[in-house]
Amino acid sequence: MLNRRTYFIREHAGVFKLKDTYDILDPETQEQIGYATEATPSWAVWLRLLVKKRNLPVTIAVREQPESAPLFRIERGWTFLRATVYVVDAQEQRIGYFKSKLFTFNGGFYVFNMQNEQIAEVKGSWKSWDFSFVSASGQELGVVTKKWAGLGRELFTTADNYLISIHDMAEQQPASSALLLAAGLAIDTVFNEQQ
């Protein structure tokens, strides 16, 4: 799944759901290629009834099959002003992290590898829901958008559906591709979810 360049993310709709679940689809064939499921501890889920979700720990596990071991996890601890989100691979090794911008009106965050090198910045707007991955040199590495005429068209639901597209660049390491996919998922699952 991690060698693809485009992913369609479809959130499962639900009125009283406590944990988020997302299908990861091939946008061309509509074939299911993965799952992103919230694996947050139960105590943190129930604490959401008293504390804002964006301040509490959250874990998202990304798998190829519902019962298989995670390909990677997205983990955020307690957050007050500025969130740091780690990406952990299948071997339980951190492969990178995201750091939210301290003061921004348009949203976005920075993407780092574990050598503390910034490999991308996620720029965009929560209002229009268009984001781009931009390298330190200013090159566009990919986009995340809801404005797509195919499978990604919103279908009268409160669930979020969006397309992650990573540009094909030979110099990108497999870990960098996984970080960019995780960053695309984190826009909604970690940084944008309010309650």
Image (cartoon, helix red, strand yellow):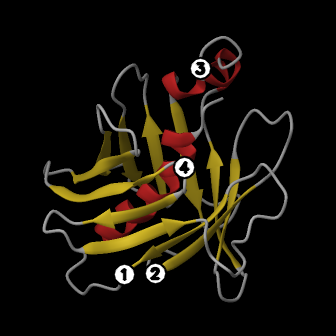
Q: Residues within 10 Å of mark 3 (few under 14, many from 20)?
A: few
Q: Alpha-carbon neighbours of circle 2 within 10 Å: few (<14), some, or many (≥20)?
A: some
Q: Earlier in the sequence, mark 2 or mark 3?
A: 2
Q: Name the residue beneath numbered marker 2.
A: 5
Picture layout, residue 66 above or below residue 172: above
CA distance for labels 2 and 3: 34 Å
Going by the numbered disc 2, the residue's amino acid type is Arg
Q: Earlier in the sequence, mark 1 or mark 2?
A: 2
Q: Which residue is mark 4?
A: 127
Q: Residue furthest top?
A: 50
Q: Earlier in the sequence, mark 1 or mark 3?
A: 3
Q: Position of residue 167 (x, y in %)?
A: 36, 81
Q: Which-is-in-front pick, marks 2 and 3?
A: 3
For marks 1 and 4, give the one nearer the viewer: 4
Residue in the picture at 48% in, 40% down: 191
Q: Residue at x 32, y 45 (%)?
A: 98
Going by the numbered disc 1, the residue's amino acid type is His
Marks 1,3: beta carbons within 8 A: no
Q: Rounded to the nearest whole Å, what is the CA distance between mark 1 and mark 2?
A: 7 Å
The answer to whether 144 is drawn above or below residue 43 in the figure is below
Distance between mark 1 and mark 3 Cα atoms? 35 Å
The percent position of residue 149, horizontal first and vertical second, equals 68, 80
Most foreground residue, 174 or 156: 156
Label 1 with label 2: CB-CB less than 8 Å: yes
Q: Is residue 72 left or right of residue 36?
A: left
Q: Which is nearer the eye, 77 or 82? A: 82
Left or right: 161 as drawn, with respect to 169: right
